[in-house]
């Protein structure tokens, strides 16, 4: 039996509006959305917990469409329980996890094993991408888009190498995939040539600051253009993950509603937060694929977000141990944890006047639900699942080892002070995070999709 909640005296941010109101949660769903004060005649036959939000802001739960929770096979980095604990502490209520685990999720049977793991471990709602390979077309064709979020295609090699580089295979994938195609777009031949040049100059002592020159803007643009050309040729639904360059925005359009777009894109918080000048202080801690690039790229991506060319904000949460991240460049894995801090980082931009709360909610909640056609999530609407997050916009705190929840125990944001704080998170109507305390007895649900 699920607990009911009356969340009153909140500033509700939803569907382009911010209003004072209340939300009644019953049996896992949003039963009522009330504008203004709770009506004097409001009553419920159910026992419910009343929460006075005290003027805090109530958002739909964040939907992160790109995470690496490392389950199964890489438990020293993280797993579905540890990383979903960090997620709910950060206001993230639904995640979509990538296939470069161990074993690689390139068959439907392996994918279902991941779903079974999540049912017992994940505090967030969840879905998993099927991974493409050069020879698993039979699995791709059999995939059910009502049950699987998408197909992940690595058009550039990254952690857990799953590179798909056969032109005929790529053409067939874009022609026949029943799933949305999400691509990691970096041209491998350009990367390898750049790497060869830097090895000739530095041997095994390549500086991390060379990362955006090796995994260059040109490598990103060439690969993204290849994906866009294939999608247009076959009328496929393409989502370009983690854009990192201003130039890639030229491949996108912003003249139609998201529901009508066939080619979409996202930006990750770290590509909005860092630029190449940060390698001096943070080094390999901010080594991601695609690489953090120039300040011009960073500012251009933010503008692309605001003008509608970029549709979604995600994290690409990808934990590694601190020991692994301290390896020399060629053996240092790319990726870093971010999911616990994604919302408060974006709220930092709000405090600087760079983005409105309404647009943040659009890009982190509404847009992922629309793009992936997720059933009854991403909005504060009557009849929708009660995935909600309550935020205090004026409650400063500093990221320190003691409050980092990632299993790897570190963050590239350590020492940063955020002005805002997540105080409560509900997943399917269950209060899983409250003022620093996590309730692990409630587990998330498998996401379903409208196909």
Image (cartoon, grey):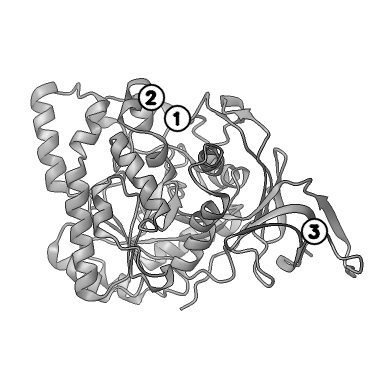
User: Disc number at residue 282?
Assistant: 2
Instruction: Assess whether mark 1 and mark 3 are in contact (beta carbons under 8 angstroms).
Output: no
Q: Are marks 2 and 3 in contact (CB under 8 Å)?
A: no
> In what element is the residue under mark 3?
strand
Q: What is the count of numbered marks?
A: 3
The residue sitting at 32% across, 49% down in the picture is 243
Q: Position of residue 293 (x, y in %)?
A: 28, 36
Q: Residue at x 45, y 67 (%)?
A: 372
Q: Quadrant of residue 319?
A: top left
What residue is at 56 percent from the left and 46 percent from the top?
87
* Whether residue 366 is visible: yes
Query: On the image, numbered disc 1 is attached to which residue?
Result: 412
Q: Tell me which label, 3 or 1, sits earlier in the chain.
A: 3
| Residue 65, image quadrant | bottom left
Q: Which residue is mark 3?
A: 5
Q: Is residue 209 above or below residue 381?
A: above
Residue 211: image tag:
none
Q: Are marks 1 and 2 in contact (CB under 8 Å)?
A: yes
Of helix, strand and loop, which one carries label 2? helix
Marks 1 and 2 sit apart, C-alpha to C-alpha, by 7 Å
Q: Badge 3: how crowded within 10 Å, few (<14), some, or many (20+)?
A: many
């Amino acid at each position: 039996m699920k607990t009911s909640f009356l969340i009153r005296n909140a500033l509700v941010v939803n569907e382009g509006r911010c209003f004072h109101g209340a939300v009644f949660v019953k049996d896992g769903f949003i039963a009522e959305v009330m504008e203004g004060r709770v009506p004097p005649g409001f009553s419920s036959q159910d026992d419910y917990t009343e929460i006075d939000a005290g003027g805090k802001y109530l958002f739909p739960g964040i939907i992160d469409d790109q995470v690496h929770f490392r389950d199964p096979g890489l438990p020293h980095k993280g797993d579905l329980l540890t990383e979903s604990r960090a997620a709910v502490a950060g206001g993230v209520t639904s995640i979509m996890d990538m296939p470069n685990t161990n074993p690689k999720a390139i068959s439907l049977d392996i994918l279902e094993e991941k779903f079974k793991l999540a049912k017992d471990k994940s505090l967030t709602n969840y879905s998993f991408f099927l991974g493409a390979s050069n020879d698993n077309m039979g699995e791709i064709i059999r995939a059910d888009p009502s049950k699987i979020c998408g197909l992940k295609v690595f058009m550039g090699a990254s952690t857990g190498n799953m590179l798909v580089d056969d032109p005929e295979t790529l053409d067939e994938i874009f022609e026949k995939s029943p799933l949305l195609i999400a691509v990691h777009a970096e041209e491998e031949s350009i990367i390898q040539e750049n790497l060869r040049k830097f090895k000739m100059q530095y041997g095994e002592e390549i500086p991390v600051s060379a990362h955006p020159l090796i995994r260059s803007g040109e490598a990103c643009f060439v690969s993204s253009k290849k994906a866009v050309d294939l999608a247009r040729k076959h009328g496929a639904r393409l989502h370009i993950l983690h854009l990192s360059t201003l130039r890639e925005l030229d491949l996108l359009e912003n003249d139609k509603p998201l529901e009508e777009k066939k080619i979409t894109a996202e930006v990750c918080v770290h590509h909005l937060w860092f630029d190449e000048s940060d390698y001096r202080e943070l080094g390999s801690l901010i080594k991601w694929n695609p690489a953090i690039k120039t300040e011009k790229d960073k500012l251009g991506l933010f503008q692309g977000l605001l003008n509608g060319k970029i549709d979604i904000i995600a994290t690409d949460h990808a934990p590694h141990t601190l020991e692994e991240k301290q390896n020399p460049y060629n053996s240092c894995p790319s990726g870093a944890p971010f999911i616990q801090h994604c919302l408060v980082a974006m709220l930092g931009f709000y405090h600087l006047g760079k983005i409105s709360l309404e647009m943040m909610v659009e890009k982190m909640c509404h847009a992922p639900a629309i793009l992936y056609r997720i059933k009854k999530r991403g909005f504060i609407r009557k009849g929708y699942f009660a995935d909600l997050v309550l935020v205090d916009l004026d409650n400063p705190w500093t990221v320190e080892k003691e409050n980092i929840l990632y299993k790897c125990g570190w963050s590239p944001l350590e020492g940063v002070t955020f002005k805002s704080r997540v105080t409560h998170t509900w997943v399917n109507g269950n209060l899983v995070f409250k003022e620093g305390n996590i309730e692990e007895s409630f587990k998330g649900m498998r996401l379903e999709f409208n196909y």
